[in-house]
Amino acid sequence: MTKRTLMWMMMALLAVMPASLAAADGELPGRWMLSTVTVQGQSEDAPANALVFEFGADNTLKMYQEGQEMESGTYRVEGDQIVMTSASDGETESVGYAIDGDTLTLKMEIQPGVEMTMAFSRTEAGNRAVPMNFVALDASDLHGKWDLTRMEQNGQGEDIPAGMFAIEFLADGTAKMYQQGQEAGSGNYTVEGDQITLSVEGEPESPAATFSIDGNTLTVVSEVQPGTTMSMVFTRSN
């Protein structure tokens, strides 16, 4: 079987994801700060950090007011609608959205016949195509075998069948990749802070990706092509 870098594995899996999981227009994941509010044609500028939405690549959602987290939950994209679900009371709300460059526009009916438009600007932190809670880790946190359980592209995801793909990081800096339980390739990896770079003999070195570990869950996030962010979620198997 041809050896592939982790990046090529990601692209191969992306190719078989259902069409319904295609990326939404623009780049929603990241942090967005409210800049203006318009109601019935009357606009008003919002103070800096008055309201910030953070859309995670893992479909989590956080809301901040004046720098303090006020609400959290989850979201999903359905056409030109963002469906948000509150973690506190389970209430769901659907709002229309559009992205033009670094501007996100949300539209909602605040009362019958009265529409409010909120314009947000992407913050500097939001330009990073990684979840905001990623931290630097030591390479030893990676040691062991990890089974791929989920893939997400620009905020939309798909669960991966058990045993389809796994990767094993060894303490000597080598790595092994498996497809359907069979070894599919091997190579070397390096870790610098929260960045991991994987290389396979005979293949170009893959671009550095950002990783985070929470208990027995490993998340690897990388830009697979300009404007397309891929998140791979693994579960430790040993």
Image (cartoon, grey):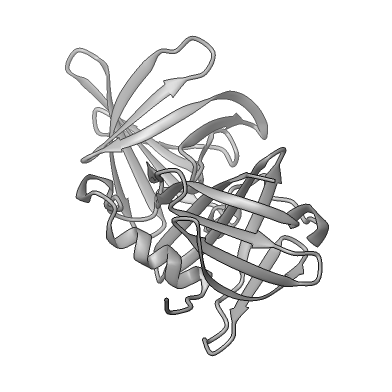
State which quadrant residue 40 falls in. Answer: top left
Determine the residue located farthest toward the top in the rendered image: 89
Question: In front here: 15 or 81?
Answer: 15
Q: Residue at 54% across / 53% down in the picture? A: 126
Determine the residue located farthest toward the left in the rendered image: 113
Question: In front here: 92 or 190?
Answer: 190
Residue 138 in view of the camera = no
1 vs 195, left or right, is left
Placement of 189 over or under 26, stated as above or below: below
Placement of 125 over or under 47, stated as above or below: below
State which quadrant residue 186 falls in. Answer: bottom right
Q: Position of residue 230 (x, y in %)?
A: 45, 58
Q: Residue at 62% across / 74% down in the picture? A: 198
Placement of 34 over or under 69, stated as above or below: below
Q: Position of residue 20 (x, y in %)?
A: 22, 45
61 vs 78, left or right, is right
Q: Residue at 66% across / 69% down in the picture? A: 175
Q: Residue at 35% across / 66% down in the picture? A: 12
Q: Position of residue 33 (x, y in %)?
A: 51, 43
Residue 202 in view of the camera = yes
